[in-house]
Image: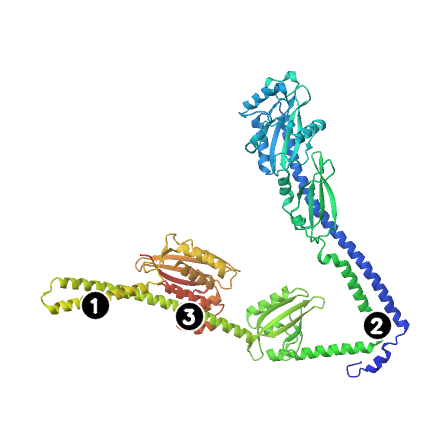
Amino acid sequence: MFTAHNFDKSETKSTFFKIPMKKMLPIVLTVVAGVALSVIGMNLTNYKVESDRQIEFDKSVSSVLSRVQNATANQEQVVKNLDGLFAASVQVVRDVFELYSTVPAKSNPYILSIGYASKVTAQDADNFVYYNRSERYYDYQIKPSGTRSLYQPISYIVPFEQNAHLSGYDLLSNQTFSEIIQKAQSKKGLVCSPVFNFRGSDTNSIVLMQTVEKKKSASSLTPEESLFQTTSDMFDGIIYVELNATKFLKTVIGDSVGSDKNIVFDFYDDNKAGLDKSVFSSNNKKNLTAAYKQIIAADKFITIGDRQFRMRFANAQEFGSGIQAYLGWITLALGLLTTFGLAGFLYSVVSSNQRALDIADKITSSNRRILESSRDIIATFDLAGVWKSVNPAVTGILGYETQEVEGRHISKFLAGDNANESIYSILERTGDESAENFVVPMKTKAGHIRWVNWSFAKSQAEQCIYCTGRDITEAKFAEEEIQLKSRQVELAEQLALEANDFKSNFLVRLTDHLRQELTGTLSGLHKIASNIDYSDDNQLAFLKMANNSSDQLYNIVNDLIDVANEGKNANGSYDRVTLHNCLLETARTLKDKYLIDRECSIDYTNISHDAAIKGDSSTISNAFSLLVSALTDGMRVSKVELYADTNAHEKVMEIQILGPENKATADMIKLYNVSTNSLMENLRNDENNILFRLAVASSQIRRMNGNMSTETLGEEGNVVLITLPMPQ
């Protein structure tokens, strides 16, 4: 076998350019076949891309058309339902018409009006007006005024409040309405108007209309029924539904669904001149820029009544853009690169097997040097987590020789049950060809603990796991030391606040006592002043000196009271707060700060709503939050119960917080109870900051002139007992 030591460069140079044609033929054929396959691949990719685009485009178009068709069908059904009402009745009065029309009018915000218009001749106009006024349209009259041979005034209209000005409006006086009425009479079915501006402003209307046929001959009608019939034709009147065209389309297709992002579209009403009149455009059309390129377009037709409206669809700005537009060229480029790479490889093989072997030998040698010199553990495991191979770095980190590690499961070298659970969980969830990072403590051969940052990459094809492990023990200890210092500083600040509050409370009590004694002294001096001999200068001098000294002491005491009460309310004490308000604030604090990824229910139903304590609500709530989070630490789902009893003799509220069984919390409670005077030093032994939270909460309770104790009850859980002063 050739190696780096016996590789002869001069021999390679002499044979490198002297390749027989017979050996070159496979290379030429490979290039020709590769180029041909690359071109075919490019064409197939382009065809596939275009097909996928067309399918996505058609889906988006179908979604829009389907929504429009369903919506228009609903409005056509409203007209048909009213036609059925008139077909089943000789005469439809106002109340019946409004009963059948109000529901669809209110259910569809884009319906401007639903109406019925009777055909009335000039000689019947007065009777017609009289009848409509009898239907409680007291101001009813035909509009616009003027004498015409035939009228088509609106008799009933819903909703009436918004359309009162149209009551009595002669539809034949409007050209568009006149045309569609004639068309409805001619076709004897449902017809649709073009989009037209009937109401002024920027409101465009679409009208669905159908005629109502007579049910009796003129001779058999009652006088009231004859008001709605004529003998000149076979139609009694028309029913119609007027839609706000823009609002209708915006409601139906204006709010884009997911598939609408692929297209832009316009809704057209083609007029008689053949010019396009755009009624509505999709929301994303306004986002088109000058760089927009139309790839796909299509015209589709929507039938509403008897009229066809055209919708023009095209691709959206981003549709078909990005890497998808260049997939064909990418396929060609990759094919050509692969072809020429393969040809180059064949050329290299044909020209010199020695060079290939030499390169392989160099690569192997380089990889071996990397493995041997690396300070990180580089290893392979089988899918169960058993070491298959490992580099010598394992000796420097864990103290084991490579042969002592290979063939053993990684869990044998982990420290702690949690680490074992973590490693099994990671081995199960690590995806094929994906990296998974985690940090675990590992035992060295000498029994020490080293923290190793592992990166796993599983390969199902090779049935193994590739991994690297970096020793981060020093960084881990440094980070823990920083966190410890931070917790010690925070606890020291809390204890300083507690000491300051204690000093303030002591000054308050001391000055209150001094003021009471001085008040008695001043009262005694006043009594003495009323009984002394004012002719005795010594007595007067002594009394004046005693009175001045007492006044000065009294002023000093008052100043001390003001200083002691600084930071408290005007009464020099804390406020009255209810336990329920504190617990509600505690629940919010836990959810936002301490139990973000955990669930904990707090049961305080046994506490009276009137139960009150004296203190600062936010401080007490924060203390409760720290205690609940400490009692439930590490538990994904937990429950805490709270009880409160009034001790009227000592004027305190006794509160009990009962948490679930939790070994980690129980251990820290034991440590807390034996290290009350050395909390700062024992924070180094704290687990998950439980001891820190207990210490801070206890300090905050003492600041409220209360006391806190905690005990572990074994299988029955852990309990915290708190006493807080009650309001006077």
| Element type where label 2 sits in the image | helix
Callout 1 secondary element: helix
Q: CA distance from mark 3 to mark 2?
A: 76 Å
Q: Few, some or many C-alpha atoms within 10 Å of disc 1 (few <14, some 14-19, many ≥20)? A: few
Identified at 43% across, 64% down, the residue is 713
- Pointer 3 residue: 492
Give the SS element for disc 3. Answer: helix
Residue 84: image quadrant is: top right
Q: 595 or 662: nearer the eye?
A: 595
Frontmost residue, 147 versus 15: 147
**What residue sits right under mark 2 in the picture?**
347
Determine which quarter of the picture holds residue 322.
Answer: bottom right
Give me the disc on residue 609. Answer: none
Q: Nearer the viewer, residue 374 or 42?
A: 42
Frontmost of labels 1 and 3 is: 1
Give the mark nearest the N terminus, 1 or 2: 2
Question: Disc 1, disc 3: CB below 8 Å?
Answer: no
User: Residue flagged by tag 3: what amino acid is it?
Assistant: Ala
